[in-house]
Image (cartoon, rainbow, N blue to C red):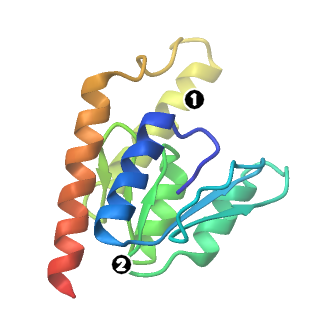
Amino acid sequence: MDADACPQAIRDIVFRASRRLQVPVTFVANRAIAPHPSPLITSVRVGKELDAADAHIALWVEQGDIVITADIPLAAKVVVKGAVAIDPRGDVHTEENVGERLSVRNLLQGLRAEGLVTGGPAQFSNSDRQRFANALDRLLTALRQKV
């Protein structure tokens, strides 16, 4: 999990899923993360360099992993390695859609740089939290059925 900007509500959902299904989870961040009492939850602290957490995740992700991130370039990197990326709002990035999402993200970034588009995403909401929980449950169920 890309823990640098992940909402606490999403972390709580991940903690519960880990405990319920006995699934290991790794949080990666460039700052200290409070330790979790579960032996299934580990934290990796990376350097302060820009995108250090993303680089670590992209290096260590394996086929079949689920990566939680709002970073579309990172999502594209993990999908190439056979993993699935899901953002905190419940959008699942796959081989079929990540290229288009990356293109749209790059276009919007360029428009923002030119001052043609202002603002960012809407506030994180309860419906976002529910969409994430549902999407994560579907992904975990699908992974368990493959085993």
Near-viewer residue (104 or 132): 132
Question: According to the image, label 2 marks what residue?
Answer: 64
Res. 83 mark: none
Against 104, residue 64 (above or below) is below
**In the rendered view, does 130 fall on the left or right side of 24?**
left
Instruction: Count how many numbered circles sit on residues in the image.
Output: 2
Query: Real-space Cα distance between discs 2 and 1?
Result: 33 Å
Task: Name the mark nearer the viewer: 2 or 1.
Answer: 2
Location of residue 107 in the rendering, given as x and y in whole percent from the top left corner: 48, 34
Dot 2 or dot 1, earlier in sequence = 2
**SS category of the residue bearing label 2:** loop
Q: Residues within 10 Å of mark 2 (few under 14, many from 20)?
A: some
Percent coordinates x, y for residue 12 in the rendering: 43, 44
The quadrant in which the C terminus is found is bottom left
- Residue drawn at x 34%, y 36% as measured from the top left: 89
| Residue at the image point whose x is 20% and y is 46% from the top | 134
Residue position for label 1: 110
Q: Position of residue 44 (x, y in %)?
A: 70, 64
Q: Amino acid at mark 1?
A: Gly
Q: Nearer the viewer, residue 33 or 56?
A: 33
- Indicate left or right for 88 with 73 as reference: left
Q: Is residue 90 left or right of residue 74?
A: left
| In the image, residue 105 above or below residue 31 | above
- Relative to 124, residue 92 above or below: below
